[in-house]
Image (tube, coloured by chain):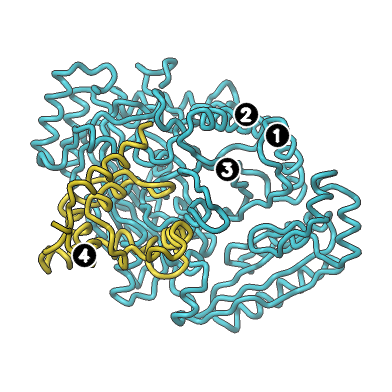
Chain colours: A cyan, B yellow
């Protein structure tokens, strides 16, 4: 395969230049090697539309990245940078545009700085969360890294794709917690943002903005440059961790419960990632749902008066909220007490103390805890899809439908009405009720997994359904925060205010900073001029 | 049918043997290092996804821990690493080089019985 629009000689000359730059061993062109850049969770697996690379090149230094970009720009070779390539469910290591050369930055795996005094790190794209964690542990530094569920991802890649984790709110949003970046542009030029733009500044990881427009956001979920270094703020290891659960009895109590939670979080009282649940409806980390409740849900859905009465009569709370606290023991016990006072405004609210840990954890505690909430990278999340007694026939992966919805009880109830109807309309498994995830402080996010199989007809049907639910969500003002390449055009099309003014702006920037359109064509719906209107 | 190709390759591997018998100590040490870094996070002891998956699959007929298996010939290890299985993705050569994969395969085959001649 040659990249689209590139003749065989130019491609061969470019590959030769890549080889001269990085060494022959680190340019991959055989079918067998290039196949390793497929998206293992591709919703197009085995179909002609599956996004395939034409080759891959793996530089080791920033200078090599610059040289590769210069050559690619000269020969107009589309390149697709990846960091650790483990963005599974969101495209993995495969390009948006088939025929692109993957710029594999995994070998750039240096941890350039970790400061225990400033609680910060500076890393290259090939560093994984496991790497950074191990580096910190080996040096016995009192620092925690906010990790996403799968720990083999890259802090650089994950934050650029707007990933999230589980610690205090200022760290949970991984892009928010970055401070300073280095970027190689399409022409091979290199720039540093924030204080990094000033030679000799000692505060690159201390002040984000430097001077003038703050452009870091333009390199996230985009294709305007190749990020080769990024700084991050790390969380100081807390003295202790405490969680407590409030339950409230009635269906309508969801609304005040969420309002109180939001107040506690926005005031900095609850500073861990809260968990919402429903003891009556069951589900993740909840008691098993009774057959009576299942029958009522199937008959009349979650708004069934019969169900509400059943919950009251049986004394089973409708909702629960687990609030979490990091900090000194005295302080977090007082924060939990204050939280209980606030939730007591809801008649019938009850409270239960849950976990309490001091750090470091004992080996038993270490094995028991949800590791990302303690800043420990893990792959345990893959239990959801892997073969197990509960899942004897595992799928081949998953993709996530993940809309942002307002942080109110009313919105949660409405979204459930809408998605339950959509599930019925599109023949999805019955959605009894779903509660949002609380990664972000100021909004909610729903996460619905769609399985990936190796069956073409099933994948095709799931893709169509996925597009339908994106459309239905957008009709209600709920937009995806991130999606796999297969759906990036569809999602970008929903952010359409004023005749797609935002996308038109992105395209203007794209044409200016990457006039040959060589970087990650199509990523997040941003296409270079020569491919616009002729999307892959 | 594309996903069946690796299995055919495995069978071919079985037919031609291919044990790590006699791998030197340095190779085995490197293999263990690769195993600990790349595999044990999912296939190590405890309720990790890879371990639970193999427990469920073999129901005790084979050890759930890869590091305790005595039947993993190198061709099998290499096929799973380069082709993946179920939700386990394949690994690129920038992650696990061919040399590291040889060492890993030798490490996982270290307890195998000598191939019959």
Name the residue carrying label 4.
Answer: B113
Which numbered mark, 3 or 2, is in the foreground of this view?
A: 2
Residue A29 higher or lower than A61, as above or below = above
Query: Can you give x and y, in whole percent of width and height, for residue A49 in the image?
Result: 41, 24
Q: Are marks 3 and 4 on the same chain?
A: no
Both on one chain, marks 3 and 1?
yes
Do we see residue A78 in this rendering?
Answer: yes
Evaluate if marks 3 and 2 touch, with contact meaning CB atoms under 8 Å apart: no
For mark 3, give the secondary structure.
loop
Label annotation for residue A422: 1
* In this view, B79 is above or below A207: above
Chain of the residue under the numbered disc 4 shown in the image: B
Are there few (<14), some (14-19), or many (20+) residues within 10 Å of tag 3? many
Tags 4 and 1 touching, CB below 8 Å: no
Residue at image coords 32%, 60%:
B39
Q: Earlier in the sequence, mark 3 or mark 1?
A: 3
Distance (Cα) linking label 3 and label 2: 13 Å
**Could you say which is closer to the camera, residue A350 or residue A434?**
A434
Identify the residue under disc 3. A402
Query: Badge 1 sits on which subunit?
Result: A
Q: Residues within 10 Å of mark 2 (few under 14, many from 20)?
A: some
Pointers 2 and 1 in contact (C-beta within 8 Å):
yes
Identify the residue at the far front of this view: B117
* Residue A426 appears left or right of B2: right
Measuring from the top left, give residue A447's x and y in whole percent: 59, 47
Between the residue at mark 2 and the residue at mark 1, the CA separation in whole angstroms equals 8 Å
x%, y% of residue A516? Answer: 28, 22
Front label number (3 vs 4): 4
Under circle 2, the secondary element is helix
Marks 3 and 1: which is nearer the front? 1
Q: Quadrant of the N terminus of chain A?
A: top left
Q: Pointer 2: what residue?
A: A468
């Amino acid at each position: 395969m040659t990249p689209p629009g590139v003749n065989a000689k130019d491609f061969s000359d470019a590959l030769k230049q890549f080889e001269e730059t990085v060494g022959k061993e680190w340019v991959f062109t055989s079918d067998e090697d290039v196949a390793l850049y497929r998206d293992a969770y591709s919703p197009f697996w085995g179909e002609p539309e599956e996004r395939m690379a034409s080759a891959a090149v793996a530089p080791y230094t920033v200078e090599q990245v610059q040289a590769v970009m210069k050559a690619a720009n000269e020969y107009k070779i589309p390149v697709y940078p990846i960091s650790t390539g483990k963005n599974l469910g969101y495209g993995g290591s495969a390009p948006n545009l088939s025929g692109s050369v993957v710029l594999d930055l995994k070998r750039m795996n240096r941890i350039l700085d970790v400061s225990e005094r400033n609680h910060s790190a500076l890393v290259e794209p090939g560093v994984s969360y496991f790497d950074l964690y191990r580096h910190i542990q080996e040096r016995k530094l009192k620092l925690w890294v906010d990790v996403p569920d799968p720990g083999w991802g890259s802090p650089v890649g994950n934050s650029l794709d707007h990933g999230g984790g589980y610690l205090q709110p200022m760290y949970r949003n991984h892009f928010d917690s970055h401070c300073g970046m280095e970027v190689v542009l399409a022409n091979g030029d290199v720039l540093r943002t924030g204080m990094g733009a000033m030679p000799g500044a000692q505060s690159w990881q201390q002040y984000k903005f430097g001077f003038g427009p703050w452009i870091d956001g333009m390199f996230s979920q985009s294709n305007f440059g190749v990020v080769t270094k990024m700084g991050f703020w790390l969380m100081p290891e807390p003295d202790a961790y405490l969680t407590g659960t409030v339950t409230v009895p009635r269906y309508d109590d969801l609304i005040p419960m969420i309002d109180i939670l939001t107040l506690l979080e926005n005031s900095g009282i609850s500073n861990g990632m809260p968990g919402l649940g429903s003891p009556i409806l069951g589900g993740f980390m909840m008691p098993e749902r009774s057959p009576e409740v299942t029958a009522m849900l199937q008959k009349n859905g979650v708004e069934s008066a019969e169900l509400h009465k059943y919950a009251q009569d049986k004394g089973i709370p409708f909702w629960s909220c687990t609030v979490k606290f990091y900090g000194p023991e005295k302080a977090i016990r007082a924060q939990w007490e204050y939280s209980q006072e606030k939730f007591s405004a809801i008649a019938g609210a009850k409270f239960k103390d849950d976990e309490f840990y001091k750090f470091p954890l004992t080996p038993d505690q270490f094995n028991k805890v949800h590791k990302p909430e303690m800043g420990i990278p893990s792959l345990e999340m893959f239990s959801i899809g892997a073969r197990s007694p509960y899942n004897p026939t595992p799928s081949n992966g998953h993709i996530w439908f993940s809309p942002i919805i307002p942080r109110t009880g009313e919105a949660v109830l409405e979204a459930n009405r809408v998605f339950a109807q959509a599930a019925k309309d599109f023949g999805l498994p019955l959605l009894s009720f779903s509660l949002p995830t609380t990664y972000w402080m100021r909004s909610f996010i729903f996460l619905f997994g769609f399985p990936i199989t190796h069956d073409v007809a099933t994948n095709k049907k799931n893709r169509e359904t996925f597009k339908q639910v994106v459309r239905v969500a957008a009709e209600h003002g709920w937009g995806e925060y991130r999606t796999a390449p297969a759906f990036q055009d569809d999602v970008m099309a929903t952010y359409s205010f004023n005749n797609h003014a935002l996308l038109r702006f992105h395209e203007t920037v794209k044409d200016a900073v990457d006039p040959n359109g060589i970087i990650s064509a199509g990523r997040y719906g941003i296409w270079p001029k020569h491919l616009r209107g002729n999307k892959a | 049918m594309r996903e069946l190709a690796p299995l055919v390759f495995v069978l071919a591997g079985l037919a031609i043997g291919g044990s790590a018998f006699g791998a030197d100590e340095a190779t085995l040490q490197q293999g263990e290092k690769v195993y600990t870094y790349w595999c044990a996070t999912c296939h190590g002891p405890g309720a990790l996804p890879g371990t639970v998956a193999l427990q469920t699959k073999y129901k005790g007929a084979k050890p759930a821990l890869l590091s305790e298996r005595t039947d993993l010939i190198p061709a099998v290890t290499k096929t799973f690493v380069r082709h993946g299985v179920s939700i386990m993705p394949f690994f690129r050569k920038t992650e696990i080089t061919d040399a590291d994969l040889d060492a890993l395969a030798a490490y996982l085959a270290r307890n195998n019985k000598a191939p019959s001649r």
